[in-house]
């Protein structure tokens, strides 16, 4: 009976086994993604026992790719990328180049073709969005400066891989693989035709799609039907991806990515993300399971040195390259270690690229198995690597003078210029953080002509503030040297507008050591933390939910004339 229902059989076994192994991985403090991949290995053709329908699995994986890329596009924020562009753009591009060179170099040493070596290197160069976001969330630093840099860095990597997915098919013939468009003429003609089609699709989406799809969402939302709204979101993702492939020759992945980008323009984008999340995550699980089905575990036994080399490039080579680039861009050692640990793994784009490479006759099947082995091991090791970054930083700081210098690099933005007006150096407010909250506080202070100095880890924001005539220093305010540069000893108030409570406590301790009478204000989103901070006499603590409730209550009472 099960053999007559291959779709149901495949779904039941894939979801069931993924659930069991995902829970087991979570219990072992590993990403659930490891469990999903192992589930695919167990029901794949290379292990004994039940074998799922591989063809069906691949088709379900295509839907998974569409919805994964749709989710990436839906959360893609050009503003967030622009905020860290001076580190994310050059850093990601150079890191991709270094990692690709390492991977391609070792593949060439194994005797692979130029095309196979290039695809292999590119697959090792890009980290997993899913793993990165969940790791940053688990450590509570997704909204921190380091978290934003890591996410911006990965967005650039994703965009680079989208470009690779577009260009690889027309270049396949020249790289020694199958040329799907051989009849189209010369390589340059084929490449030009491909770029023309992609440009036409992007222009259509950015010009027409931005106007049509947000209005369509508004129209459907007006029905009040949650099911129709969810259906509209999913239909847009899949239909645009399919239409892009059929009409413009664009990959499903690119089509779905732009569908997400277009729908982000709607005021319903957050709801669209929320409503489609269960379906996106379900098919993402199927995608990872189907990837696991392609993995041949024999590669671990037959080619252990190659597997170790791949893991070394991903975990060590990429990490060192990323850390060095961050330090060269004058960011502190703390940022370098967080970013490098975040990127020390590979995931969904690597799988998509490996599958495309094999289908184009560029990447040997053993290369796909090595990439999958590297992904499994690097994802499993990533929590360990991430946790090790903090003690490694402490150890380096205590043992190495160079590390201490790197923690506080020579940087003109780390000191207030000599020309800073005297009014900013006495009785001023020291404002830590210039994000959404800090920016509003700064605006209110400026409107009332109250002097303030901003301490911010984002060098680009500091450059912008100084260009506008403001007083700002670059660095982590948990470092006493940063607050000293902000003249905390002569300030009247310290306002900590970042959500990191642990760092805030260190800042308050430093401020009170240098200025015992200073008033301190900080924020938190956790009620228990708020109570703890108030007991420690940390100053005025604002709890996000309380302030929101107070503001809404005040408005309601004012409308009824009951406000006091």
Image (cartoon, rainbow, N blue to C red):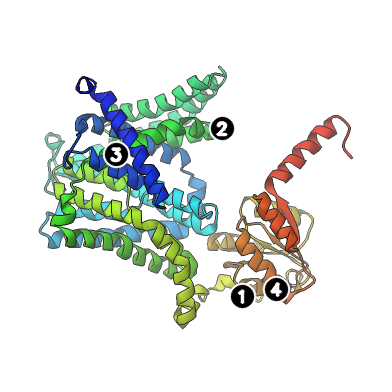
Residue 550, quarter of the rendered image: top right
Residue underneath mark 3: 289
- Mark with earlier residue (3, 1): 3
Q: Is residue 34 visible?
A: yes
What distance separates the C-alpha of mark 1 from that of mark 4? Answer: 10 Å
Residue 64 pos. (x, y %): 33, 34
Q: Is residue 37 above or below residue 396?
A: above
Quadrant of the frame with the N terminus: top left
Q: Residue furthest top?
A: 223
- Mark with earlier residue (4, 2): 2
Residue 9 pos. (x, y %): 26, 26
What distance separates the C-alpha of mark 1 from that of mark 2? Answer: 43 Å
What distance separates the C-alpha of mark 4 from that of mark 2? Answer: 42 Å
Of badges 4 and 3, nearer the viewer stands 3
Q: Secondary structure at mark 3?
A: helix
Crowdedness near tag 2: few (<14), some (14–19) or many (≥20) residues, C-alpha within 10 Å: few
Of badges 1 and 4, nearer the viewer stands 1
Residue 368 pos. (x, y %): 20, 48
Residue underneath mark 1: 481
Q: Secondary structure at mark 4?
A: loop
Residue underneath mark 2: 267
Asked whether, in this view, residue 343 is left or right of residue 360, the answer is right
Residue under the image location 42 percent in, 49 percent down: 27
Asked whether, in this view, residue 169 is left or right of residue 564, the answer is left
Crowdedness near tag 1: few (<14), some (14–19) or many (≥20) residues, C-alpha within 10 Å: some
Residue underneath mark 4: 487
Asked whether, in this view, residue 479 is left or right of residue 126, the answer is right
What distance separates the C-alpha of mark 3 from that of mark 2? Answer: 34 Å
């Amino acid at each position: 009976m099960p053999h007559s229902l291959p779709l149901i059989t495949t779904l039941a076994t894939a979801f069931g086994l993924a659930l069991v192994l995902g829970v087991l991985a979570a219990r072992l403090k590993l990403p659930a993604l490891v469990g999903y991949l192992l589930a695919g290995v167990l029901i794949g053709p290379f292990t004994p026992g039940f074998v799922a329908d591989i063809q069906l699995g691949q088709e379900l994986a295509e839907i998974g790719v569409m919805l994964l890329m749709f989710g990436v596009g839906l959360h893609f924020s050009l503003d967030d990328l622009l905020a860290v562009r001076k580190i994310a753009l050059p850093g990601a591009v150079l890191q991709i180049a270094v990692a690709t060179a390492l991977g391609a170099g070792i593949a060439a040493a194994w005797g692979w073709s130029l095309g196979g070596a290039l695809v292999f290197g590119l697959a090792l160069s890009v980290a997993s969005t899913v793993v990165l976001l969940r790791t940053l969330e688990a450590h509570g630093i997704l909204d921190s400066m380091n978290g934003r840099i890591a996410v911006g860095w990965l967005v650039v990597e994703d965009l680079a891989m989208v470009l690779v997915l577009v260009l690889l098919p027309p270049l396949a013939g020249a790289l020694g693989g199958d040329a799907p468009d051989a009849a189209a003429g010369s390589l340059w003609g084929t490449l030009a035709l491909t770029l023309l089609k992609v440009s036409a699709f992007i222009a259509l989406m950015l010009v027409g799609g931005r106007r049509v799809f947000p209005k369509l969402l508004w129209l459907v939302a007006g029905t009040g039907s949650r099911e129709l709204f969810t259906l509209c979101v999913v239909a847009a993702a899949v239909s645009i991806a399919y239409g892009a492939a059929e009409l413009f020759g664009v990959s499903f992945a690119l089509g779905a990515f732009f569908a997400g980008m277009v729908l982000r323009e709607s005021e319903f984008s957050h709801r669209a993300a929320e409503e489609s999340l269960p379906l996106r995550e379900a098919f993402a699980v199927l995608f990872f399971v189907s990837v696991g089905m392609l993995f041949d575990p024999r590669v671990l036994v037959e080619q252990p040195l190659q597997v170790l080399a791949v893991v070394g490039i991903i975990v060590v080579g990429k990490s060192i390259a990323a850390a060095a680039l961050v330090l060269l861009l004058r960011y502190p050692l703390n940022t370098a270690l967080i970013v490098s640990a975040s990127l020390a793994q590979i995931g969904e784009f690597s799988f998509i690229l490996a599958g495309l490479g094999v289908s184009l006759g560029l990447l040997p099947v053993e290369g796909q198995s090595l990439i999958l082995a590297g992904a499994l091991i690097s994802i499993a090791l990533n929590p360990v690597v991430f946790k090790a970054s903090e003690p490694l930083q402490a150890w380096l700081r205590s043992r190495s003078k160079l590390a201490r210098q790197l923690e506080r690099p020579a940087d003109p933005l780390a000191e207030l210029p000599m020309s800073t007006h005297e009014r900013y150096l006495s009785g001023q407010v020291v404002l830590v953080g210039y994000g959404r909250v800090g920016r509003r506080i700064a605006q209110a202070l400026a409107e009332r002509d109250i002097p303030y100095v901003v301490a911010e880890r984002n060098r680009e924001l500091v450059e912008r503030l100084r260009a506008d005539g403001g007083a700002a220093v670059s660095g982590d305010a948990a470092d006493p040297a940063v607050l000293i540069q902000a003249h905390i000893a002569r300030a009247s108030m310290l306002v900590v507008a970042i959500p990191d409570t642990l760092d805030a406590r260190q800042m308050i301790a430093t401020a009170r050591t240098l200025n015992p009478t200073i008033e301190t204000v900080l924020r938190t989103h956790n009620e228990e933390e708020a109570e703890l901070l108030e007991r420690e006499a940390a100053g005025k603590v604002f709890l996000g939910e309380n302030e929101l409730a107070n503001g809404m209550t005040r408005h309601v009472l004012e409308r009824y004339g009951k406000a006091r």
